[in-house]
Structures are given as structure tokens and as C-alpha cells.
Image (cartoon, grey):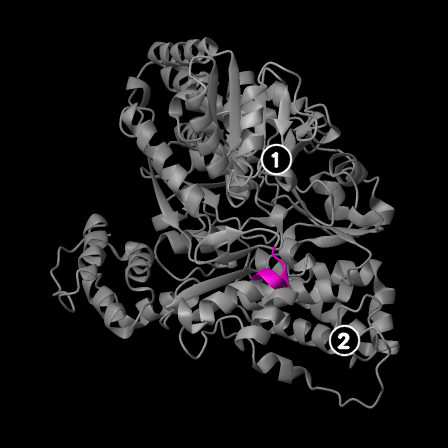
Amino acid sequence: MTLDELREIAEKEREEQKQVSHSLKVCVAAGCLSLRSDQVLNILQAGVKERGLEGTCRVRGAGCMGLCAAGPLIRSEPQHTYYRGLSPDHPEIVGAILDNLDGPPLPEFALSPDLPFFAAQQKIVLENCGEIDPERIEDYIAAEGYEALLTCVAGRAPEDVVQEIIRSGLRGRGGGGYPTGLKWSMVAKAPGDQKYAICNADEGDPGAFMDRSVLESDPHRVLEGMTLAAYAVGATKGYIYCRAEYPLAVKRLKTAIRQAEKLGLLGKRIGDAEFGFEIEIRLGAGAFVCGEETALIASVEGKRGEPRQRPPFPAYSGLNHSATLLNNVETFANVPPIIRRGGSWFSSIGTEKSKGTKVFALVGDVNNTGLIEVPMGITLRDLVFKLGGGIPGNRKFKAVQTGGPSGGCIPDQYLDMNVDYESLMAVGSIMGSGGMIVMDDSKCMVDVAKFFMDFTRDESCGKCIPCRIGTTQLHGLLERISAGRGKMEDLDTLERLGNMVRRMALCGLGQTAPNPVRSTLKYFRDEYVEHIAGRRCAQGRCPCGQKPMAGGETQGELTDAGAKSVSG
Amino acid sequence: MQAYPVSVPLPSDDKRWKLVAATMRWHSYRPAALIEVLHTVQESFGFLDEVSLRFVASSLHLPMSTVYGVATFYHLFSLKPPGEHTCVVCMGTGCYVKGAATLMATIEEVAGVKAGETTADGRVSVVAARCIGACSLSPAVVFDGEVVPKVQPSVIREQFRRWMSYDAR
């Protein structure tokens, strides 16, 4: 396929879309699907046939529209409206939408796209999510898809593509924030004939689903981004390492790969040029540590997902000891628009050191739970109160947790902080992959810290001792405190042990595992003290109960708690 | 890595072994395909037993210790047969702050099993998931592959009552 042929397909598809005056798009990403949006889609399609509207109204499944809290969502054009909360149990309401295509939107189910939740977003990664049918490559091509790729293979030097990414200032969206352009140029310069490109779709952070949504809503964007990267660094073989917990994402990726191969946009001689690139999917098997790059590579090789010492970095010696480029889903998804519109356009968005936009999963105690994409540098207050619509039940905001088990809890005094890599680091958390869990005042921070330590203790691969033993002991201390059996000196032990694990662990999992404890100790120390001195949990979430416990409990030995761990 | 064409005899006439063999052939019996092959075994048989692990090990020219090491490293692989029904409770942060622990406690109360266990009558396996990505609809539970959003303890009670009553067979 050449660029001209691609544009022909795009033109034809756009023409076809213009033929119909009305369009209804139904979200068929996992969130809305669990609310049976597929049945709503069927009712709509049957309704269109019944009413003989085939020529005027086009009903399609589309990707994630973001506001999962109001699902299943439907987008109606040209009414310029979202319809929310439609249930297949009420087909008459779904039918009423079809009877009212030209009138004003049905007020009781309409949501205006001008609401702050939609209007305050700036979409780059998610620009096609909710717009195109994820299972049709023509839809993606009509939205300028694969244009960047074919333009590059037809006439742009690989070094030039790397330079464009460097110019954009894009940083890795998986958590660490390493400059993407720099990584690409390292792999491009690395010696060796066989190079690999791997997409990290092992979105293990609990409370985060950005990558799942992108893969389910716009899989071709990830394929195009990966292929562009492969062209830039000279890779010929690629893997997408995807969680097995995301069956729909895997299915849509497989469909997308097949479609792209058929059109010659993937495989040998892409765009009739000398360049060839193949992508295979590798399924994860439920190990959080496989999000770490060296562990992920071991897992692609069919081994236990244990990290190894770096250097050598995967850029020099990764998969099968060859130079390997490893980027996150969202990072790759940023690539096609950057190539299309230029690196300087991208770097004009965001803050000085954090360019572009970031996708966040807004979950927990917040009214508008869902997926949002905002420019870097937005304040936490805007995120939680403007886009998120505040805390349900008029409760008080307590903290927001970012970065998953590697991040920390940020208290209300930092609500006006700008969200970017450096600022989050400065308050003891990290950007992470973009999960943002909002917590109201009914949550106990000791309990939250215990939850995360339980997670990392269980997910520690066991290879290095600081992480394997350290996380177990930290969890044991927290369990003791939350049971009302803690001692004051436990707080110092938590800090000392946390620091030790942070400094000595082999990989990112261990090095960041103490963050939830450290940040809650720093900002919510009084809660820990209350659990120890008062032997009570004000929120009633811990085993010690809301009322002060009678004293005289035997002090459990630390190792008791440790003995039963490291089983799973 | 060198690929060895091999023909290890299938452990039995069970047709499902052919699926496993097909996956290995597709990957040219490369040891790197181990995880993919174990996925196929688990999809076909529901779990990994010693027979299947030995079959995979000899077919891929891997020591049994390596295969066993991989099978036990990953949470998703199970060495025990699953119950008739599976209930996966998402324990991701989003679900946790919305009360997933209460759901787990409800299950223990009605079925007497904890996460990772199967009821004594073999009816229901209970699994705790790290995060199923349905965070905006938390707490979420997966009943036999179907994601159910915003679950209340009453929903759990009802589902388990249906699964565990004798008429359910």
C-alpha cells in the first residue's frame, strides 16, 4: 500500500460517513460492556431497521467515551449530545432516541459535551476513543491513521523520526518518565542486526485502566506508534506484552494486527518500502513485577518474570540479548500525532519539563469516575473538583493516591499543586501510569498503607532479599498497628526499614514499594499515633475497631506475620 | 535459539491434547513459547497437572524444574482443578476503597471459603484479582467470566445461593 492508496481509502470512508445525516455511537469498551451496552447497540440497530432509517442514521460501536460512571454512554450527532445510563431493560427509552433524532436531546438522559468533564480535556492519545469503531481499520484510516507511518517509510530518514520525538519532549508514560527520544536514539545507535520493539501493555497498577481503554478503543494507534518506533530504531520484530486479564483488549489487538497485515501496513515491505515489521502478542499471566522492563523481557522469553541487574540496559541487551526498545502503550499512542503534527506542536503543550497531555483514570470517591486526558501541569484541584465533579455524599476530600503501589497519598494541602513528573516526585509520590484514586474522609490511611504493602509483599518476585523480606516485615508492622497492638517505636522501624528497602532493592518494584507507607507516615502521622496510643481506628476500618481497645494484648512477633506470606 | 522438531506422544486420546500440541507446533517448539503453551493447557483443561507439565517439558526440551518454576511463578496458572463456577473479586485499589473487602467477607460468610479456595462440594472457586480494569465501576466482581459492576453484598449472596443450591445442577 502506498500513501496515495491509503488516502483513497480515507477519502472513500469519509464520503460514506457523510452520506448519512445522523450518527449514534455506542460505547463498547469493557466498562460500558459490563453495563450491557452491546445489547443497547443491538436494540438501536434493530430499531433503525424497523423504522427504515438505514439511509439517514448510522449506528456504530465505538470506544471509551470517558465518563464510565454514567455508562452505558451513547454519542448522538448532530444533536451534539451524550446519552447516559441507558439500559437494555428499557428498550422504549432507547427507541425514543431514534424517534427524536432531529428534535432537541431528551433532557432526562442527555449530557452536554460542554460539561467541564468533557470540555476541560485536551485529547491527543484519546482523540479517536469514542469516535471510531475500534474493529474497523477504515475508521482509523479516515481519521488520518497510518498517514504518519507511510509518510515516514516513503521518505523520512529514521534519524529524522528520532529527532522529531526528541524535539517533542515526550517522556515515558509508564511511570518513570524517561525521555522517549533519548531511549529511541540509544536503541538506534546500539550495535546488532536484530533489534526488537516491545510494547508494555501489562498494566498492573491496581486502580488504573488507561492502557486497557486505549487498546480497546483505538488499537491501530498503538500498532502505528510501535511500527514508527521500529522504523526509527531499526527493529524488525515486535511484541505486545498484554495482561491476560484484558481479554477484550487482546481480541481487538488481534483483529487490528490481522487487518493491518492484510492492507500491507504491517508485515513485510510496509508501504512498498524495504522496511518490514511484524508484531506478535504475548500474554501475561498475572505477575505485577512483569511491568518492570527486564522482568517483562524475561517473561516474553518464556521464563519466570524476575528482574535482573541493570546495566546492561535493554536498549543494548534486552530480548535474546539484542537491543530492545520498550515503551508503554500510552507512549506509543502519542507517537503518530507527534509525527503528523510535529514535535514542536507537542512540546507547546504542558509544562517546562513535562510535555504534552496525560491520561488519568479517575476512580474512588469522586462523582465522575472515568478516563480523562488533560494537559500536564493541571492542578489536582481541577482534576478532582472540576473534572471529577467533587466527592460524593458531600464528604470531605482526604487524599488522592497516584502511582499505584509505587506512589503515595497526597493530602489536601497540595490540592493546588501542578500535576507533572517533578512536582509529584517532590511530594513523595510519582506520576506512575496514571491511576488517580480519590479518597474521602471515611478512609483510614493506615489501612490504605497496609493494603498496598499487602500487594507488594505478595507481588514481590522473591529474587532480592531487601524486597522479599522487607515488604513482608513492613506489612507485618502495619498489620500489628492496625490490630491495635502497635508500639510507638514501630513508626521509626517503618521509616528505617522503608528507607533500607528503597535503597537496596534490585528493581523498581522494591525501590518504590515503601512509598505508600512513607507518604502516609509523613502526612497522616497522627492517624498512626491514634492507632498505637489510642488503640482505635477513627474510621472503623481496621481490626482494632472504632472504640479504644482494652490494653494487655500480647505483642505479636514480627516474624509471625511474615511466616504465612510468600505463598502465592 | 535452535528449534527441534519433535514428536512426543500425546499423554492420552483426549482431543484437548491436540490443541496443546498445535500451539507448540505454531511456535516451532521453541522454549520461549512456554508461557503461551501453559495458557493453552489451562484454557483447555482448566488447570495444570503433573501430566500436562511433564508433556510440555519434554516437548519443549525444558527441564521439568523450569516448567514447574514458571507454572508456580505466575498467579494466573493454577495447579488445582477449578470449581464448577468461578467468582473473581477485584481487589484493585479502586474496588478496595469502595468496599471489596466487605464483599470478600460476605463470600466467606456464605460459602466458607477464602480467596484462592474452592468450596468443599467443588461448586465455586473464589479468586482475588489484582485489578480487572473496571475501576470506574467499582467494586466489580466477575461471575463466570461476566463482569458485574457496582456489586453490593446482596448480589453476592444471591449469586452464591443460586450456585450452591442443589437445584442448580
Residue nearest the observer in this picture, A78 or B40: A78
Which element carries disc 1, helix, strand or loop? Answer: loop
Residue that numbered label 1 is attached to: A66
* Residue at image point 78% right, 82% down: A485
Residue nearest the observer in this picture, A74 or A395: A74
Q: Position of residue A385 (x, y in %)?
A: 79, 39
Quadrant the C terminus of chain B occupies: bottom left
Residue that numbered label 2 is attached to: A481
Q: Work out whether A427 lies above or below B97.
A: above
Left or right: A133 as drawn, with respect to A102: left
Magenta segment range?
B151-155
Is B152 covered by the magenta stretch? yes
Left or right: A314 as drawn, with respect to A432: left
Is A371 covered by the magenta stretch? no
Residue nearest the observer in this picture, B77 or B98: B98
Identified by mark 2, the residue type is Ile
Chain hosting mark 2? A
Measure how far apart labels 1 and 2 are at the Cα level. Answer: 39 Å
Identified by mark 1, the residue type is Gly
Q: Earlier in the sequence, mark 1 or mark 2?
A: 1
| Quarter location, residue B95 | bottom right
Chain hosting mark 1? A
